[in-house]
């Protein structure tokens, strides 16, 4: 690699959160950090495009997002950037406060951005990949999807989900011994086959109920997914009813990390 190529690679490292880049064909690790992505937020710290059907593009990755205003208020699903530091318990008002994380900020500290996520719990196994609620792919800033190897992501409970599991509300019962809430990551391979791995955001085992629910950023190992073209998330809970999962299908992520090849136009 000559000096000009090294200079270009160094700029890519700085702008995309890459770990290293020594040869043209070497894979690199990209960690998506929203505080390195130019996004606008409203006065409450929520992404300014939350009410639009607009995906979030960050460091070459594309995160699905759908949003719209309705007579009943804001409707959204997928990934929404947020930097809200509010961890207040809004008893009886929860549907209006769904962009909050238990730590009051992302991995970079209080008030720093992270993804608030909402999974559509009516999503069935046969739903088309492009219609998955919480879907991630890598384009490197281009149009075509490129292969990547997910490595890890940090996960946490949203305040809404945490407090309703802990205390219960009009729609969700209070979690008891033996209950759990599971976040499942699915990897889709080039041949259409899938792999998956999971982590529990609540695991009600043991006498100390204060340890049942995740309230800090926790590393979720995604390496078992292997090389993929797409990743999507689903959820599973022991609290289910006639219409599916009763537990609020909100969760939060930050610092999604994956190994991939830089697009040729960056080499």
Image (tube, grey):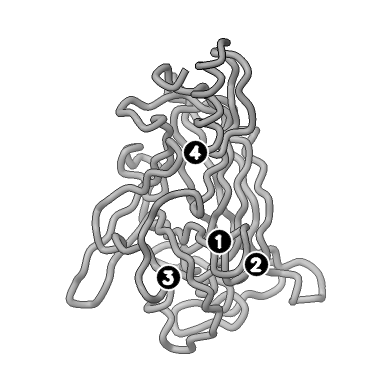
Sooner in the amino-acid sequence: mark 2 or mark 1: 2
The mark found on residue 237 in the picture is 1
Mark 3, secondary structure of its residue: loop
Residue mark closest to the camera, 4 vs 1: 4
Residue mark closest to the camera, 1 vs 3: 3
**Residue at the top extreme, as displayed:** 1
The quarter holding residue 266 reads: top left
Which residue is tagged 3? 45
Where residue 154 appears, x then y in whole percent?
62, 52
Q: Are marks 4 and 1 in contact (CB under 8 Å)?
A: no
Q: Nearer the viewer, residue 228 or 175?
A: 228
Q: CA distance from mark 3 to mark 4?
A: 23 Å
Identify the residue at image location x=60%, y=23%: 21
Mark 1, secondary structure of its residue: strand
Mark 2, secondary structure of its residue: loop
Q: Are marks 2 and 4 in contact (CB under 8 Å)?
A: no
């Amino acid at each position: 690699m000559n000096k000009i190529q090294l200079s270009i690679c160094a700029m890519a490292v700085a702008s995309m959160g890459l770990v290293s880049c020594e040869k043209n064909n070497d894979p690199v690790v990209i960690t998506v950090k929203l505080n390195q992505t130019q996004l606008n937020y409203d006065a409450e710290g929520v992404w300014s495009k939350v009410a639009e059907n607009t995906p979030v593009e960050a460091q070459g990755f594309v995160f699905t997002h759908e949003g719209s205003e309705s007579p009943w208020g804001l409707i959204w699903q997928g990934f929404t950037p947020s930097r809200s530091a509010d961890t207040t318990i809004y008893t009886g008002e929860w549907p209006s406060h769904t962009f909050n994380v238990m730590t009051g900020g992302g991995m970079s500290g209080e008030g720093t951005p992270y993804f608030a996520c909402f999974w559509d719990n009516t999503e069935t196994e046969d739903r088309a990949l492009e219609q998955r609620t919480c879907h991630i792919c890598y384009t490197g800033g281009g149009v075509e999807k490129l292969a990547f190897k997910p490595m890890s992501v940090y996960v946490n409970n949203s305040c809404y989900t945490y407090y309703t599991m802990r205390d219960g509300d009009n729609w969700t019962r209070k979690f008891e011994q033996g209950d759990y809430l599971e976040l499942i990551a699915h990897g889709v391979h080039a041949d259409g086959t899938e792999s998956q791995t999971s982590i529990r955001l609540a695991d009600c085992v043991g006498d100390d109920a204060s340890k049942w629910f995740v309230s800090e950023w926790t590393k979720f190992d995604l390496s078992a997914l292997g090389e993929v073209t797409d990743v999507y998330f689903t959820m599973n809970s022991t609290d289910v009813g006639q219409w599916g999962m009763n537990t609020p299908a909100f969760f939060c992520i930050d610092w999604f990390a994956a190994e991939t090849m830089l697009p040729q136009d960056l080499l």
